[in-house]
Image: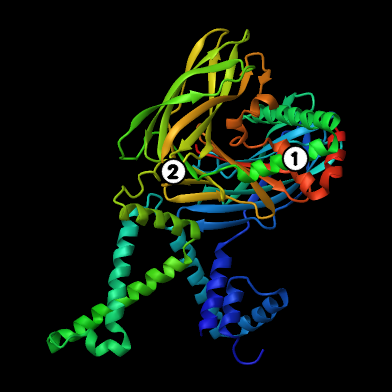
Amino acid sequence: MNGHAKETDLALYASGDVSLWQRAAIHLHVRQCERCREVVAEFRADRGALRDASAGLPEGVDWARLSAEMTANIRVGLEAGECVAPRRLRKAIPASIPERWRPVALASAVAAMLTVMLVGAWWLNVPAQDTQALNRAMHSIWHGRSAMSDERVAVIEASSEGIELRKNGGSLGVSQDAARLMTVSVSTQGSASAHYVDQDTGQVTITSVYAQ
Amino acid sequence: MRNNIVILGLAAVSALAQTPGRKIDFPVDSPVTAVSSDWSETRATPRGGAYVLDVHAVLSLRNSSQKRIRGVMLAVQAQEVTPGGKGSVSVPSLDVAPGEAFPLRIDVPLLCPLGAGGPMVEVKLDGVLFDDLTFYGSDRLNSRRRMTVWELEARRDRKYFKTLLETAGNDGLQKEILSSIARQADRPSTGVQMVRGRSTNTDPEREVQFAFLHMPDSPVDPTSGTARIAGNEARAPHINVQNRSERAVKHLELGWIVKDQQGREFLAASIPSDVSLAPGKSSLVTQDTALRFSERTQVDSMTGFVSSAEYADGSYWIPTRGELNDPKLRGVVAPSPEEQRLLQIYRKKGLSGLIEELKKF
């Protein structure tokens, strides 16, 4: 390997996602190249920090409050984004704002834009079930109901899509792609069941979730 | 640069998702043994303070007993004390001879807390039902009762179709099968949410009386009952039942049918209840439960019926096909697991395949 290894190869090597021979080749190179060794160490540190950050969310997250703050941030960010859009830059800072306050206004707008980007990135990467929980919270807020009043107790849902157990903003849904969903049922003692039929053999599999 | 970010993101995600540990924990004297297992599609992903375990596995189990197996239920859990951490997978309508192997597919999502020694999926045997209706297992998920009812329904339905074949011939059987398929397609369904405990609906409530379907052969008869209705929500059912048989009843299950203001009827839930009903005695069945339907489903009226009962001596009562042919029940009650299996065999192999299957029993 001449020169330095590619940054993407080093990132994949750091996370153990390269093929065996690539790993051996990069390993040999990294042993001899101090700069690449440092890059690998940085990637590993980043990965550890990412894992710590993802594990660090408190259990009792107030999703209702979080969703309200997110909604507000998104609105502020969108408005700020309009302000800092390049073609409208001149209009975004009205002439009525004194010259000495313009840098402050611009900095505020940039900060809001960064907030939008961060929130957007988080939103895109959050698991779909969490997104649905937040959507339900915002829907409840929109309709003037207590945001997560139901979510603090276990909610079991059965529909033509399958069965789902929700609690504390978390959600567990059951589906079997390889089989045909025939029926779903709910028991008032706190469980739901879905009947799936294998399309080739006809074997029936019944999956249940239990609210404890 | 953008590609690098995407690759780095994918690398980070794949680094966070990991293959959880797994444990198949069957008792030493278990009548089924695990021959092989494929967990390659199972993943654990950290989310907040927990791991989400997407359990997708295929087990191959062997009947190591001396009897034919009719049903198996496995408990699948991440950690028993974790809310949402428990599921089960059951396979009814089996006919597995001693020494034979059969597949069992597990598709269950689970939660387990971080820091509990890594994500771990545990599969335990909850119960096995044999062809003589004897049972083996811990029965922590009431598998004995559920599988026995499924097996009794299977015998009833096979007998019904075999009798139909004998009396009405191939055409009569085919007509009934097509009618069942059509009913299944037409059976109304609506999303229902069940919340145990208090209701959160702020609409004004009213108390609505249950109507009841009385089955001639049922050992238990519902006599009166009410539930609280508010818009699309029904809660706190209270139903008086009387044992009209000569044997004590220790468990019964009621079906709860709801009719909305558009006239659509559907089976909303089942109400299982442990009771102590001596012959001739009455009891009150209550559940602190709320059912919520889709917003356009405004509850108009309700109907209840007894769907199964267990006597104190361990024997069972289930409705006959004739009782299930009640026009109100025909449209809302789902076919038994065995009928679902036979319908699928008809879809796949046609009438001859179905007749061949019926002749096996």
Q: Is residue B259 left or right of residue B228?
A: right
Determine which residue is flagged by label 1.
B177
Q: Position of residue B1 (x, y in %)?
A: 51, 85
Give the quadrant of the N terminus of chain A.
bottom right
Residue A10 to residue B265: above or below: below
- Residue at horizontal 55 percent and vertical 25 percent from the top: B305
Type of amino acid at the residue the image marks with label 2: Thr
List x then y, in percent, for residue B121: 62, 47
Amino acid carrying label 1: it is: Ile
Q: Callout 2: 10 Å neighbours few (<14), some, many (20+)?
A: many
Task: State the SS at label 1.
Answer: helix
Front in this rendered view, residue A112 or B40: A112
Q: Chain of mark 2?
A: B
Q: What is the chain letter for disc 1?
A: B
Are the numbered discs 1 and 2 placed on the same chain, yes or no?
Answer: yes
Q: SS for tag 2?
A: loop
Q: Nearer the viewer, residue B307 or B88?
A: B307
Q: Which residue is painted at 61% across and 10% down in the image?
A: B245
- Picture coordinates of residue B318, whole percent (x, y): 66, 23
Label at residue B297: 2
Regarding residue A138, the answer to whether it shows in the image is yes
Relative to A113, say whether B19 is above or below. above
Which comes sooner in the sequence, label 1 or label 2? 1
